Amino acid sequence: MKVEVVVISKEIIKPSSPTPDFLRKYKLSYLDQISPNLFMPLVYFYPAYGKISNWERSNQLKKSLSEALTRFYPLAGRMEDNLYVDCNDEGVEFFQANAKVEMSEILSNPIPGELKQFLPYDLNDSRDYCMAVQVSFLNCGGMAVGLIISHKIADAMSFHMFANSWAAIACGDTDIPYPKFDAATIFPPRDHVPVSKSVTKEEIVTKIFVFPTSKIDALKDKYANTNGEKRRPTRIEALSTFIWSRFMSSTQVEDNSNKIYSIEPIVNLRPRFDPPLSNDYFGNFWIPARLLITMDIDYEKESCGVVDKIREAISNVNGDYVAKLRQGYAAEMDIKDKQLVRFVFTSLCRFPIYEVDFGWGRPIWVASASHGMKNKVAFFDTLSGNGIEAWINLKKEDMAKFEADMELCAFLSQTL
């Protein structure tokens, strides 16, 4: 899939109502401060719909976006250092573009590096904007809505809350919950917090690996027998273990004796409060659980044990951990150790990403894009719902070895 996207217009969309002066300064929380300084992306692909013109669809998006920004007013502001957002209503950039490609070409051969063209900025671009939008119209009459939001102000849950609220407003829905902007009260900001350095200067390649449900079930059975008990892991636990083991087998067989490996599943903290927080809390409420593994084990034989350790690491992020974090415990997003090889897993499975309907139906595919975070895996439900897409970022040389691994290939589907 080769894509040529030409931007034909750009304008600033501001909130439909001015933000009151007493809300002008939106403080970042501690977890905002330590979150990576990059944009989170999603591209929503929609087929051609009736006789609605591109101009009408674009105007519907802009009008509803303006109304959504009144509710989510920090997104229309500007980031000030690593401290707060100036909610000055300067607005978000809205790009309109033409894409010389058919929807069928995108779905039959999606290339994450090409999908970046459907986004308004480079994802590693450290701007003071909090979000931006690009709407691209395809040759076939379909369209792509590319949305990026700064990870300094929102996590995946907050991203989807905004996207679904924006879509609901576009459809005329008025029964929409308001976001709760209390993150800085719950996790007060701290002085002299270093900005997370998650992006590497190495050449990173992103590829999509699709695991059908039948193969995922086989992996769950494979890793079920642990410590003499038959306990089936979740889909994400099984896939995380399998991908990590194939990464180790294919790329780490040489010169790994002095390395320490860290498996880091991302954990949503909201349900781990006592009492739990609702999903309406906006901001960064996540932390990586961390499992350290040295190379004195046979990772081929010990995969079942790794499943247990992943589950244990996640369970350790509990109410007591949250209380420690609120009392001043320093969470480490980055560990500065040259011998440490980190592998991060995050899951958007079961998130309502296919419910973003602006009035012309649900998207037929929702995609991410390539970025500069090394050894990161993001899980998405497939378009059909019969499997999971794993978006995997590796160094170029590691990806060449990883995708050639025969055991990995035996568990993959060839289509979305």
Image: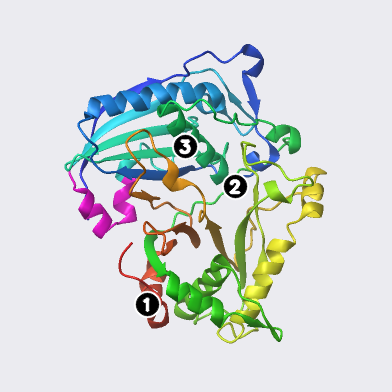
Is residue 127 among the parts visible in the rendering? yes
Q: Specify the amino acid type for callout 3.
A: Ala
- For disc 3, the marked residue is 163
Q: Which mark is residue 409?
A: 1
- Where is residue 199 drawn, in percent x and y? 49, 51
Q: Which residues are magenta?
A: 100-116
Circle 1 or circle 2, nearest the eye: 1
Instruction: Judge the density around disc 2: few (<14), some (14-19), many (≥20) Cα neighbours within 10 Å.
Output: some
- Where is residue 135 drawn, in percent x and y? 31, 34
Q: Is 59 drawn above or below residue 270 in the view shown?
A: above
Quadrant of the frame with the C terminus = bottom left
- Where is residue 258 drawn, in percent x and y? 62, 77
Is 13 positioned to the left or the right of 322 in the image? left
Of residues 248 and 195, the one drawn nearer to the viewer in this rendering: 248
Q: Which mark is residue 391?
A: none
Say which residue appears at 71% left-offset and 68% top-offset: 312
Badge 3 marks a residue whose secondary structure is helix
Badge 2 marks a residue whose secondary structure is loop
Badge 1 marks a residue whose secondary structure is helix
Instruction: Judge the density around disc 1: few (<14), some (14-19), many (≥20) Cα neighbours within 10 Å.
Output: some
Question: For residue 234, what is the image quadrant?
Answer: bottom right
Q: Is residue 157 magenta?
A: no
Marks 1 and 2, how far apart at CA: 34 Å
Circle 1 or circle 3, nearest the eye: 3
Q: Is 355 drawn above or below residue 88 in the view shown?
A: below
Q: Specify the amino acid type for callout 2.
A: Ser
Say which residue appears at 52% left-offset and 21% top-offset: 70
Marks 2 and 3, how far apart at CA: 25 Å
- For disc 2, the marked residue is 196
Is 219 positioned to the left or the right of 305 in the image? left
Quadrant of the frame with the N terminus = bottom left
